[in-house]
Structure formats: C-alpha cells, structure tokens
Image (cartoon, grey):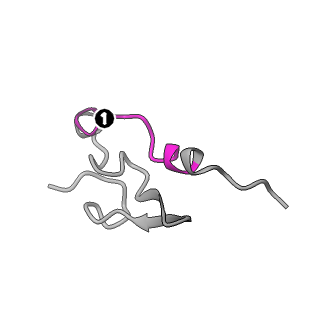
Amino acid sequence: MPRAMTDQQWDAQNGTVSPAEAQARGPCWCCTGNGVLYSAFGGKQIKANCGECKGSGKAQP
C-alpha cells in the first residue's frame, strides 16, 4: 500500500507559483494550471475542481 501524504505534502501539490506569475504565464491564476485545488481540513485531504477555470487549468477571459 502506498504511503499516505502528510497534509503539508498534500497542500504542496497546489504549486509554488504566485497568482500574479500564473496569470502572466497564461494558466488559471487560482489553481496555477492544475485544474484542481488541494486542501486538508478536519483531518481529511480534499481535492476539488477549481471554481475559477471549472477544472480546465486555463485562464478565463
């Protein structure tokens, strides 16, 4: 069985690009092109589609 990620490792999947840098490069500023957002809350690791780009990872006009 694969080892579970810590909450910090889980959150790190969001990337390190700032929203301004992501916007300048072209992908969605909110998810930095992943299409999803990772969060740990209440002891659970959550993966949710990005509400800004609707999961496409692309910047919206």
Q: Position of residue 52 (x, y in %)?
A: 25, 61
19 over 59 or under it: above or below: above
Comparing 56 with 44, the one in front is 44
Name the residue located 30 percent from the left edge and 38 percent from the top edge: 22
Residue 4's quadrant in the figure? bottom right
Comparing 36 with 60, the one in front is 36
The extreme left residue here reads 61
Side (left or right) of 8 relative to 56:
right
User: How many numbered callouts?
Assistant: 1
Q: Where is residue 28 in the image (x, y as percent from the top left)?
A: 29, 50
Residue 25's quadrant in the figure? top left
Name the residue located 55 percent from the left edge and 65 percent from the top edge: 43
Name the residue located 51 percent from the left edge and 43 percent from the top edge: 12
Dividing the image into 4 quarters, which one contains the N terminus? bottom right
Side (left or right) of 46 relative to 31:
right
Q: Where is residue 37 in the image (x, y as percent from the top left)?
A: 42, 57
The extreme right residue here reads 1
Q: Which amino acid type is marked by label 1?
A: Ser
Name the residue located 26 percent from the left edge and 46 percent from the top edge: 29
> Label 1: few (<14), some or many (≥20) within 10 Å?
few
Magenta range: 10-21
Residue under pointer 1: 18
Side (left or right) of 24 relative to 50:
left
14 over 17 or under it: above or below: below
**Secondary-structure class at tag 1:** loop
Dividing the image into 4 quarters, which one contains the C terminus? bottom left
Comparing 61 with 52, the one in front is 52
